[in-house]
Amino acid sequence: DQIINKIAFAGDKEHGLVGIFSEGNNIPVYTLKNVDGHTEWSYKTADQILDDINGMQKFVDKVTMSVERPDTLALPSYLYMDLATRRIPNTETTILSFIKEHAPYIKNFESMAELQDTAVGVNTSGKNAAFLYTKNPEKFSLEIPMPFMQYPVQVKNLETEVPCEARTAGLMIYYPLSMILAYGI
């Protein structure tokens, strides 16, 4: 399962399997606004973070002529917690609750450790990433033609072995413009 998860995010170049961060997957990359030499959200105000998220949504809307409207925002776990607890100045509203209430199309929010800059072998950019996408298997899916399977126990000499097998075809991205990546959050 760990290997299948790694393939879902990083792909497998040797076997031609596509992942979210692999080259040639045709997922657009959004360039974040640079504020005082930083694109990271830890340096940005609530309004500047909202500008980045709105910019990502506007980009997809403009490129697809309003056909695609991503509904799920995935963030690194600790940045998700930051948005969930950081209040907009002079209010009791957090940035995440404001987005949940006012974003016209984003309905789902997820935290994914694989989007962190420290995710080994998965996030190939080395930077925190945001992933805005349409949560619909018609847009993209992880194909697993043979789920994890354990065969009967085999006793050989003084060892007990349990042969296991699984197969994946990687990520199938049918509509790459239904999603967008932003590096450096």
Image (cartoon, rainbow, N blue to C red):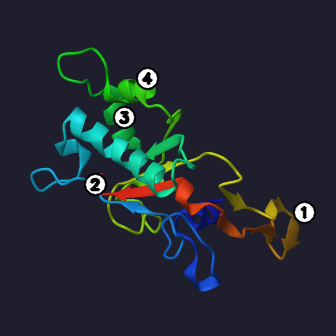
Q: Which mark is residue 101?
A: 4
Q: Tell me the amino acid under the disc marked 2.
A: Leu
Q: CA distance from mark 3 to mark 1?
A: 43 Å
**Which is more N-terminal, label 4 or label 3?**
3
Residue 32 point in image, percent of width and height? 28, 54
Q: In the rendered structure, which disc, 1 or 2, sits on the residue that comes first in sequence? A: 2
Near-viewer residue (103 or 150): 103
The answer to whether mark 1 and mark 2 are in CB contact below 8 A is no
Label 2, residues with CA under 10 Å away: few <14, some 14-19, many ≥20: many
Mark-to-mark CA distance, 4 and 1: 51 Å
Task: Determine whether label 2 and label 4 are within 8 Å by CB.
Answer: no
Q: Mark 3 — residue?
A: 81
Query: On residue 32, which mark appears?
Result: 2
CB under 8 Å between discs 3 and 1: no
Which is nearer the N-term, disc 3 or disc 1? 3
Residue 5 placement (x, y as % from top left): 60, 60
- Given residues 169 and 135, the one toward you in this image is 135
Tell me the mark number nearer the camera, choosing from 3 and 1.
3
Q: Position of residue 163 (x, y in %)?
A: 81, 69
Q: Is residue 131 visible?
A: no
- Element class at badge 4: helix
For the point 16% across and 54% down, which residue is it? 38
Q: Which residue is mark 1?
A: 152
